[in-house]
Image: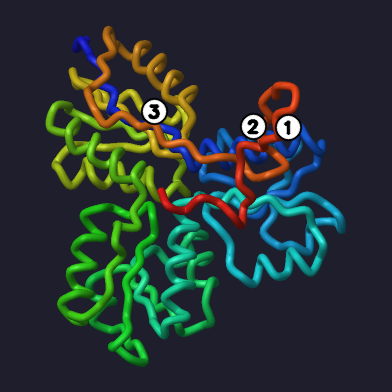
Amino acid sequence: MTQKTIMLANPRGFCAGVDRAISIVERALEEFGAPIYVRHEVVHNKFVVDNLREKGAVFIEDLADVPPGATLIYSAHGVSKAVQEEAAARGFRVFDATCPLVSKVHVEVAKLHKEGYEFIMIGHKRHPEVEGTLGQLPPGTIHLVETEEDVQRVQPSQTEKLAVVTQTTLSVDDAASITAAVKARFPQVRQPKQQDICYATQNRQDAVKVMSPKVDVVIVVGSPTSSNSNRLREVARRLGTESYMVDSAEDLRPEWVQGKSRIGLTAGASAPDILVRQVIERLRALGAVSVRTLEGEQESMKFPLPKGLAVRRPQATGEAADDDAVGASDADTSA
């Protein structure tokens, strides 16, 4: 049997936005008790969703399935204005688990729309983040493109005030090439001051780019519905490295690593570390004898919880109460 070494990409796994979204659901369950209703899967990971469901979270798509007076949480992907308005009309207690980096895009399009801008959005059709962003403005204001070919077909009503935004979990390379196509067709297009692709997506793709030339195969831990996890597998394959994605250790096929001495392992931003540990144990059973963590970008980003869910710190006598948090609608989107 070939002696196998596992090389762990760094960083990998949970990002700040996912960690915050899961914490919001868990804190709501602690504060208000089950059931807590969540519109769409709070993050795209089966293990996480199943775990929260066991604790009392109920995942729904239609707000009509939520009883009056219930607590509702929006997923990390964000929701449209129409969903927000319906939730308000139905009188739910709402907590917004939208990733602040997605909220930043929502704020930007709303601001520029007031200045008369139309938008080209680079993203995947029917992805909930894309649907949420499209739904921030009236129909026909944001034009979705998925490929460079789509860019040639798009027909904005005017080009004097045109801006480009992207889904936060895209392939960095794909987004760059499509943005270049937009810029070539619409030279005056306004681009964001900072790219919309989030730091975690960028860092995990960069880590795979560093790891791929050093290994014989790359295993990505992530659910099939996870956009950022799928992009990690694509990044490795584009670099010529065999790559597979697993939702759990049971999905890993022995033939994928047969005859391979260096196995690269990473995880999407919505995949918990326990799944990575289980895959490592599975690889050990298949002959892996050592684990090595590669050098990579250190992440320290943290996002506060909404008011009403933050864990309060003990306060000194006479000290003002401090939630140490911002409300969903007041979330810090400067990151």
Q: Is residue 86 left or right of residue 282?
A: right
Quickly name the residue at label 3.
252
144 or 298, nearer to the observer: 298
Residue at point 53% right, 82% down? Answer: 138
Q: Residue at x 56, y 33 (%)?
A: 47
Distance, label 3 to label 1, CA atoms, is 28 Å
Question: By what rule are the colours in the image chosen?
Answer: rainbow
- What's the residue type where badge 1 is placed? Lys
Residue 284 at x, y percent in the picture = 35, 12
Q: Quadrant of the N terminus?
A: top left
Q: Camera-side residue: 94 or 176?
A: 94
The crowd level at tag 1 (other Cα within 10 Å; few <14, some 14-19, many 20+) is: some
Name the quadrant containing residue 251: top left
Q: Is residue 268 above or below residue 126?
A: above
Mark 1 — residue? 55
Neighbour tally class for label 2: few under 14, some 14-19, many 20 plus, Cα within 10 Å: few
Q: Position of residue 300 (x, y in %)?
A: 39, 31
Tell me: 133 left or right of 79: left
Q: Is residue 284 above or below residue 198?
A: above
The kind of secondary structure element at disc 1 is helix
User: Can you tell which quarter of the image residue 291 is in?
Assistant: top left
**Distance from the alpha carbon under mark 1 to that under mark 2:** 7 Å
Residue placed farthest to the front in the image? Answer: 318
Mark 2 = which residue?
A: 51
